[in-house]
Image (cartoon, rainbow, N blue to C red):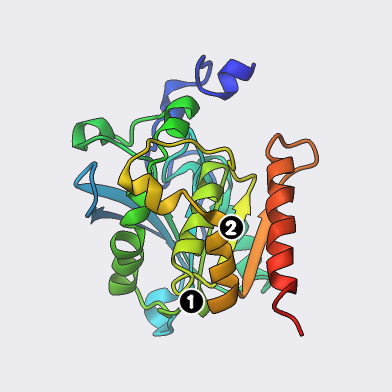
């Protein structure tokens, strides 16, 4: 079971191991707008990547500007993982309809590392072990200019940190922490669910830029650009809970130290 969970042994239908379409027949029918974009990448790897964007149903008629929520997948994931397994359409539809959450633009990009276009074809499934050892920061290096700038250029966003959030699960949560810490002037809200705090990576310049000195970066973040919201989640028996709790304690100390 452990080997299967890590993607070493697979019993799942092969179709579930690929990103697939943003809307799949037989699944929940979204009540709002689903769009797909292939955006150019400015860092090593594939020349372009795909993102799925979920918009309020009246986006094109409203003329309004909207906040943006960047939602990152974990290991063994891809741009449709939150759709396939996280029920993001259903959740957003319900919250927006009941007025329990502000309507926003939800962006789900592929944030796996791939070698080139051939390696990326069909958003190739990556085992957890492979993903863990390929956290080298290349995708994150280009994130603000490739993903954020692209979204701001295509959609009517509110392009400031007060209306921009990034959150993710597992490795995606780990990436979110560093994206927020490295770009505190870009993201005002950071969410990290069961972050893979033991993330490993290759000792390359990308990794040194993104995956070192987290606590130092957090101190700068709280000092210069205190987050509007900083959320850490880990289940009671989650293997990542001890590390998440430690990070929570450190973050609380930094926050309290700013008070009179």
Q: Name the residue under label 1.
A: 161
| Closest to the observer, 99 or 45 | 45
* Label 1 neighbour load within 10 Å: few <14, some 14-19, many 20+: some
User: What's the residue at 24%, 41% (across, down)?
Assistant: 45
* Label 2 neighbour load within 10 Å: few <14, some 14-19, many 20+: some
| Closest to the observer, 5 or 256 | 256
User: What's the residue at 32%, 41% (across, down)?
Assistant: 204
User: What's the residue at 51%, 63% (across, down)?
Assistant: 181
N-terminal of the pair, mark 1 or mark 2, is 1
Relative side of 98 to 123, left or right: right
User: What's the residue at 20%, 31% (across, down)?
Assistant: 118
Is any part of residue 195 visible from this angle? yes
Residue 227 in the image, given as x and y percentages of width and height: 59, 73
Is any part of residue 225 visible from this angle? no
Q: Mark 2 points at which residue?
A: 215
SS for tag 2?
Answer: helix
Residue 98 found in image quarter: bottom right
Name the residue at the right extreme: 236
Q: In what quadrant of the picture does the N terminus appear?
A: top right
Quote the CA–CA distance across marks 1 and 2.
21 Å
Residue 236 in the image, given as x and y percentages of width and height: 80, 41
Looking at the image, do the residues carrying marks 1 and 2 touch, with CB atoms under 8 Å apart?
no
Residue 70 in the image, given as x and y percentages of width and height: 47, 60
SS for tag 1?
Answer: helix
Residue 117 in the image, given as x and y percentages of width and height: 20, 37
Does residue 64 sit above or below 59 in this rendering? below
Q: In what quadrant of the picture does the C terminus appear?
A: bottom right
């Amino acid at each position: 079971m452990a080997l299967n969970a890590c993607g070493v042994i697979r019993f799942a239908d092969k179709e579930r191991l690929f990103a697939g379409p943003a809307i799949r027949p037989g699944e929940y029918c979204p009540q709002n707008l689903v769009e797909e974009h292939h955006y150019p990448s400015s860092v090593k790897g594939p020349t372009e990547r795909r993102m799925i964007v979920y918009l309020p149903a009246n986006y094109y008629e409203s003329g309004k500007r909207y906040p943006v929520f960047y939602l990152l997948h974990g290991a063994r994931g891809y741009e449709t993982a939150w759709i396939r397994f996280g029920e993001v359409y259903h959740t957003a539809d319900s919250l927006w309809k009941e007025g329990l959450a502000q309507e926003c633009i939800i962006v789900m990009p592929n944030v796996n590392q791939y070698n080139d276009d051939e390696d990326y074809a069909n958003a190739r499934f990556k085992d957890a072990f492979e993903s863990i050892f390929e956290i080298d920061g290349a995708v994150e290096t280009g994130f603000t200019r490739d993903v954020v700038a692209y979204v701001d250029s295509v959609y009517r966003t509110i392009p400031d940190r007060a209306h921009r959030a990034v959150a993710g699960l597992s490795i995606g949560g780990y990436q979110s922490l560093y994206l927020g810490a490295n770009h505190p002037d870009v993201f005002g809200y950071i969410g990290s669910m069961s972050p893979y705090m033991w993330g490993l990576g290759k000792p390359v310049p990308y990794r040194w830029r993104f995956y070192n000195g987290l606590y130092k970066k957090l101190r700068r973040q709280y000092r210069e650009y205190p987050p509007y919201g900083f959320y850490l989640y880990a289940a009671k028996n989650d293997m990542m809970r001890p590390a998440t709790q430690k990070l929570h304690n450190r973050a609380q100390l930094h926050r309290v130290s700013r008070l009179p």
